[in-house]
Amino acid sequence: MARPLASSSRSSSASSLAAIETPDFLSRHTSQISSSATSILDEPISYTVDLAPKLSSALSTCLSSTLDEMIRTEGGGSWPPRPTYRDSWPHCLHIYDRVARQAPPRFVTPQLRPNYTDSELRQRIDENRLWLEQSLSSADVQQVMATLPELDVNARLGFLACTAYLIHLYRWGTLPVVAMAQDEKSIAFPDSIQTPFRWLNDFYGIESSGGCLYSMTLVNVVSHGGDDLELVYSNMRHMPYPSVVDAERYNAFVFYQMERLSLDLYHSIAQCQTLMAQGQEQQAADALKQGHVALRAAFRHFFDTLKEEKIRKSVWMSHAQGFHGWGVDDFDGVSGDHSLLIRTLDAFLDIPLRTEPGCPFATAQVPVKSWDALCPVSGASASTLAAPVLVPTAAPGLVGRFYNWMWPTSPKAETKLATVPCVGKKQMKEIRFSEVPYSNEYLPRGQVKWIRAVREARLRTLASTTPNSPVALEMNEMLKTFKLWRMGHTRKAVYYEDLELPERKPMTASGGVGGGVAQEDEGLAQMMEKLEARLRARIAATK
């Protein structure tokens, strides 16, 4: 028996931001920082008692304990999470795993570009949803719900991956995603899926009514050691096109591996707080140096993965990313913006949570292929710009070195096509976009507490109070790395998102760039302008 999805009592964007900025002792997520500080301040103050050691001890453990708590509750004791699946579940849950593995050949269109009529699509979506509901009709929902609180933490993580996968299958009805399904804003989900999935989201503090980066990716990958990874619930594993299979796999693996590589960074941030509280500045800086090594490795892995040899642009959105979308009850779905690594860096380096609307594009000069090359932002010919600039690809300076590392020149080429705004020294293009502040609605509460604790520790501010602080110097080096990554990420995002797909309306990876699915009077070009404007605003804010 299906029932309408309950309307979510969502907070507005403003309230989401307020939740991030509100001190923990005033919010629903009480962190170790607030509890530790309060316990000290509640004691009678005596002029003869030296509070420094107690303060140092309390502060030195809060980030470490918050990180440990997140890893224990949301990782099953490791990070990235280490879920277990069917073999560790009670028998009443096995039907979910069985149906999840049977579904892909029914839901995934054999052709890369579906060419159904509207009536055929409607029938296909309805029949697939009916099959999914009937296949799960024998599930004893009451017994399932009684089982969930008793599940081992790792088994619960695996079941979260399974139910998130199933509810997204039902939401779309057919893959690749088609415009007809994109237009649906409210869907009646079967109780057999909706009831346990909603309980699991509530259990982990995920406010979204759909899946998120955590439930769709991090707990849907199993590691057999090192780089030997397997996607547990896969839509494309049965497909005869290697590019399609690889796009889905690497799309998931890149987030998983970046988290694996970033764990040393998280520990170094916690250790930095401990050592700074003890007055050991050089040791704190040395800890951050090790974390910086991990950060560079994570970013290197990102760029080594997001390239045509591994993830083809022609199939990425249709056969990998699109399925992770949601678009129901005002929730957008999975986005790279929900990455714990990126959120942690923003908090650690005290990057503002807001970016200003109307932020002008950066004026960095990059080479263009020819006078007739199209500007990737405006679509205008370079010859229409007042002062287009050709720059040798062997550009000097830090930005130039990064550019040449990211996009090496072929031996015969003298210049390369710019993929950032083709502006001259006096040419600026300003794009106005709706402000969409960071939202906690797609993150489990342990990650929210960790990110908030890192921001409230204000380590960058504390380090800057000491002249020639080695910690501040190392943070500045990390900031350069982060800003360079954002520059490269902008280039990658624009490249992969800028693709017309005939079966669907233009849709970015999430609504975070101002709406997700294109409106009636909006096309791909307008969506890409807003996407690049927001990404460049984040670059400008990273300082």
Image (spheres, rainbow, N blue to C red):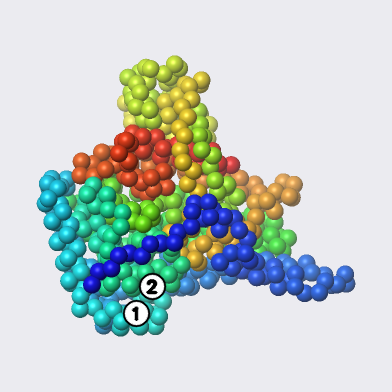
Q: Which mark is residue 82?
A: none
Q: Which residue is more in the foreground, 241 or 285?
A: 241
Q: Can you give x and y, in whole percent of width and height, for residue 459 in the image? A: 65, 55
**Mark 1, other Cα within 10 Å: few <14 / some 14–19 / many ≥20:** some
From what the image shows, is residue 192 above or below residue 533? below
Tell whether label 1 touches label 2 (CB within 8 Å). Answer: yes
Q: Is residue 358 visible?
A: yes
From what the image shows, is residue 310 above or below residue 392? below
Q: Which residue is more in the foreground, 165 or 158?
A: 165
In the displayed structure image, the side of residue 398 where residue 148 appears, left or right = left
Q: Can you give x and y, in whole percent of width and height, for residue 8 in the image? A: 41, 62
The residue labelled by disc 1 is 145
The residue labelled by disc 2 is 199
Amino acid type of disc 2?
Trp
Q: Is residue 268 visible?
A: no
Q: Can you give x and y, in whole percent of width and height, for residue 371 in the image? A: 35, 18
Q: Residue at x 86, y 72 (%)?
A: 46
Q: Earlier in the sequence, mark 2 or mark 1?
A: 1
Q: Residue at x 50, y 67 (%)?
A: 446
Q: Which residue is more in the foreground, 480 or 320?
A: 320
